[in-house]
Image (cartoon, rainbow, N blue to C red):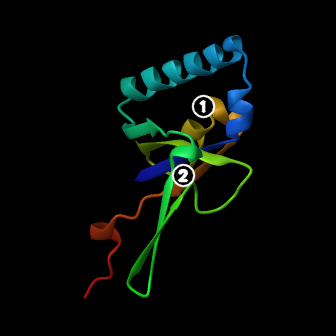
Amino acid sequence: MKYALLIYVDEKKTAAMTEAESGALFAGYGRLEGELAQQRKKLAGEALQGVGAATSLQVRGGKRIVKDGPFAETKEQLGGFYLVECANLDEAIDWAAKIPNVANGTVEIRPVWDFEADAPKS
């Protein structure tokens, strides 16, 4: 089953990290990337630019409403994601626990909808 591991961080705390702290964080991601590759679990994954680079879109009454920044003000912002293939939720939780930012942020684990397998049978 596919799971999205959504990584939420406080951008202000990340920006305030020392060079040593950010180096350790990136080294942790390097180890995680190696392990995911070795076990062929990673389907996709990317770091996202900060919320200052975000654009939000809504369509209301057929009209586009385009705004700079995120849709909602939150303490933590979506900073990146992994898409992984796991046997079950427990395995996805194990991988999420290895994400370096989980120590100072939140990793949301979401099963990916498989429309072919999960679609109602007619």
**Secondary structure of residue under mark 2:** helix
* Of marks 2 and 1, the one in the foreground: 1
Res 104 visible = no
Position of residue 8 relative to residue 21, above or below, is below
Name the kind of residue labelled 1 in the image.
Answer: Lys
Which residue is disc 2 drawn over? 89
Rounded to the nearest angstrom, the CA distance separating label 2 from label 1 is 14 Å
Q: How many marks?
A: 2
Give the camera-side residue of 14 and 39: 14
Res 81 visible = yes
Instruction: Give the image quarter of residue 46.
Output: top left
Position of residue 37 relative to residue 41, above or below, is above
**Secondary structure of residue under mark 1:** loop
Which residue is disc 1 drawn over? 98
Instruction: Give the image quarter of residue 85.
Output: top left
| Left or right: where 65 falls relative to 122 | right
Query: Where is residue 4 drawn, in percent x and y?
Result: 48, 50
Q: Which residue lies furthest to the top in this view?
A: 20
Other residues around mark 2 within 10 Å, as few (<14) / some (14–19) / many (≥20): some
Give the camera-side residue of 12 and 105: 12
Question: Mark 2 near mark 1, Cβ–Cβ under 8 Å?
Answer: no
Q: Which residue sits at x=60%, y=51%?
A: 108
Other residues around mark 1 within 10 Å, as few (<14) / some (14–19) / many (≥20): some
Query: Where is residue 57 drawn, in percent x and y?
Result: 46, 66
Q: Which residue sits at x=56%, y=16%?
A: 27
Q: Which residue sits at x=48%, y=56%?
A: 55
